[in-house]
Image (tube, helix red, strand yellow):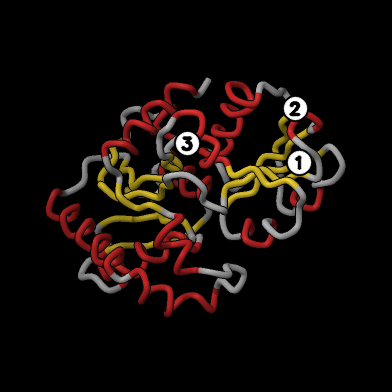
């Protein structure tokens, strides 16, 4: 019998978590669903799942939701997969397409435009294929695995968590494991043990899965050095500051 429905992000940076879950005792007792971040957030908000790795921006609208793990998807500076791409410098950008797969990174971009760069381009919602609109004075926010390819294509690449670190001195948290209801404590203990095990086997998970992510040139560096998985005191402070700045 399935006990809990769990949604996780389908990006490369999540594979240590997925690896840990798949090789744990809880795997057969959950319904594990993989999707892009904004869809995971929708599922949690609409009670389609019980626990999800979701953009932390969801906490602004749903303060009753609870973080259920001390693990996250975060960074302490440059990350390579949450970037603004453009053929022109910031002051010349007139329009930015917002990645439809994102929630937290969209809010981060809004904050940086308003508070740090002091620019006010037109921000456009997007659909699949929006990346093809980048030209002249039109830029785009691209997150996740598609950014590996975009990093090689455009003259200007603005790494958002790197700039957040410059602005605040704090790390950034993109997604946390969040629940919309009370979860059995024993299950949460096993769940977090599975995540911890996955993080202890990052290199093993890379060897198993890297063929599915050919555009990541240096997967070991990306998962071991660019992505930071521990939701520590500094990340919680960064998350608090970020949520307070969302309008």
Q: Which mark is residue 121?
A: 2
Describe residue 26's horizontal placement relative to residue 208 as left or right: left
Task: Find numbered disc 1 in the image and state the secondary structure of the residue it sits on.
Answer: strand
In percent of the image, x 30 and y 44: which residue is there?
A: 231
Q: Residue furthest right?
A: 136
Describe residue 133's horizontal placement relative to residue 100 as left or right: right
Q: To which residue does mark 3 refer? A: 165
Residue 138 location, quadrant: top right
User: What whole-number distance in Å separates the C-alpha atoms at marks 2 and 3?
Assistant: 22 Å
Describe residue 127's horizontal placement relative to residue 168 as left or right: right
Residue 22 location, quadrant: bottom left
Tell me whether circle 2 and circle 1 mark residues in contact (CB < 8 Å): yes
Label 2 vs 1, first from the N-terminus: 2
Label 1 vs 3, first from the N-terminus: 1
Are there few (<14), some (14-19), or many (20+) residues within 10 Å of tag 2?
A: some
In percent of the image, x 39 and y 29: which residue is there?
A: 62
Q: Is residue 122 visible?
A: yes
């Amino acid at each position: 019998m399935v006990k809990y429905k769990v949604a996780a992000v389908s990006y490369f940076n999540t594979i240590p978590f997925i690896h840990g879950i798949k090789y744990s005792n809880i795997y057969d007792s959950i319904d594990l669903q993989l999707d892009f971040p904004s869809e995971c957030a929708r599922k949690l908000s609409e009670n389609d799942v019980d626990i999800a790795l979701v953009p932390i921006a969801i906490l602004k609208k749903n303060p009753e939701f609870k973080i259920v793990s001390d693990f996250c998807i975060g960074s302490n500076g440059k990350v390579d997969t949450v970037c603004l791409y453009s053929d022109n410098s910031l002051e010349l950008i007139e329009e930015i397409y917002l990645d439809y797969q994102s929630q937290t990174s969209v809010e981060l971009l809004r904050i940086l435009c308003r508070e740090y760069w002091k620019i006010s381009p037109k921000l456009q919602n997007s659909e699949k294929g929006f990346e093809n609109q980048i030209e002249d004075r039109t830029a785009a926010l691209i997150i996740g695995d598609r950014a590996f390819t975009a990093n090689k294509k455009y003259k200007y690449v603005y790494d958002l968590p790197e700039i957040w670190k410059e602005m605040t001195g704090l790390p950034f948290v993109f997604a946390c494991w969040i629940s919309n209801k009370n979860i059995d404590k024993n299950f949460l203990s096993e769940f977090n043990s599975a995540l911890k095990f996955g993080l202890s086997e990052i290199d093993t998970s890379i060897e198993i899965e890297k063929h599915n992510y050919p555009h990541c040139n240096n997967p070991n560096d990306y998962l071991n050095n660019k992505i930071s998985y521990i939701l520590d005191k500094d990340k919680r402070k960064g998350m608090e500051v970020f949520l307070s700045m969302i309008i």
